[in-house]
Image: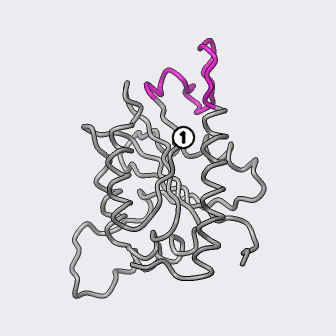
């Protein structure tokens, strides 16, 4: 059974630090992804969600968690925009992941990671393990931005003037193509039968 309507993609900005690059990276990726008319994008900035870090199994979901849950549940796919901090990903992202379970299950996830020379790949690698535990499907392709300050201008535009050409546009296209394929396949599968947990 083929489901209809645009694919809903949540673009999650993981960093909550002052002076962060995350909103710039998310806006750049979102601008590229909006060229695909079959996508409906929902930017989610964790700095604005104010999710509590303390969790108790016996309590009702706090209002901040209850407010975010429907947006994650409605998503057909996720793009995690994350920096790499000390070879890992931000604590705010782990808090956001751990507050939810069914909202992630049976859906594809990809990453826009950034950092120094690694381009955030250590963070993305760890996140692949975390999301596999939640029955989410991390796709092979992702976008990595090593030494991102050398590629983006101060106003967030890309490419920065007088920098060497990059294949970044093609990387984004390939990643979005793969995300769309998986999002369709898994949305159809969830329509036939809920993802077992």
How many marks do you count on the picture?
1
**What's the residue at 66%, 64% (across, down)?**
184
Question: Which residue in the structure is indicated by mark 1?
Answer: 24
Asked whether, in this view, residue 70 is left or right of residue 85, the answer is right
Asked whether, in this view, residue 155 is left or right of residue 138, the answer is right
Query: Looking at the image, what colour scheme do you see?
Result: one colour
The spot of residue 62 in percent (x, y) is 34, 80
**What's the residue at 55%, 27% (across, down)?**
154
- Report the span colored magenta: 146-168
Q: Is residue 161 above or below residue 195?
A: above
Q: Residues within 10 Å of mark 1 (few under 14, many from 20)?
A: some
Q: Nearer the viewer, residue 38 or 95?
A: 38
Q: Is residue 181 magenta?
A: no
Q: Which quarter of the figure is the C terminus placed in? A: bottom left
Question: Majority secondary structure of the magenta segment?
Answer: loop
Q: Quadrant of residue 113?
A: top left
The spot of residue 151 in percent (x, y) is 54, 23
**What's the residue at 46%, 54% (across, down)?**
138
The spot of residue 124 in percent (x, y) is 39, 44
Q: Is residue 118 above or below residue 177?
A: above
**What's the residue at 76%, 47% (across, down)?**
35
Q: Which quarter of the figure is the N terminus placed in? A: bottom right
Furthest residue in direction right, as rendered? 37
The spot of residue 81 in percent (x, y) is 47, 47
Q: Is residue 53 above or below residue 143?
A: below
Asked whether, in this view, residue 197 is left or right of residue 68, the answer is left
């Amino acid at each position: 059974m083929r489901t209809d309507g645009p694919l809903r993609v949540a673009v999650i900005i993981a960093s909550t630090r002052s002076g962060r690059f995350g909103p710039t990276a998310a806006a750049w990726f979102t601008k590229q992804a909006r060229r695909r008319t079959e996508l409906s994008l929902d930017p989610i900035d964790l700095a604005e969600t104010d999710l509590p870090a303390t969790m108790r199994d016996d309590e009702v979901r706090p209002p901040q968690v209850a407010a975010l849950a429907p947006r994650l549940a409605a998503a057909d796919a996720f793009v995690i925009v994350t920096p790499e901090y000390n070879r890992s990903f931000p604590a705010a992202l782990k808090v956001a992941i751990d507050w939810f379970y069914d909202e992630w299950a049976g859906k594809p996830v990809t990453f826009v990671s950034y950092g120094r020379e690694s381009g955030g790949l250590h963070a993305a690698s760890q996140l692949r393990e975390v999301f596999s535990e939640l029955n989410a499907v991390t796709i092979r392709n992702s976008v990595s931005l090593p030494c991102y300050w050398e590629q983006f201008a101060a106003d967030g535009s890309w490419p920065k003037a007088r920098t060497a050409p990059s294949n970044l546009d093609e990387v984004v296209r390939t990643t979005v193509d793969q995300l769309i394929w998986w999002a369709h396949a898994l949305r159809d599968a969830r329509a036939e039968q809920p993802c077992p947990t």
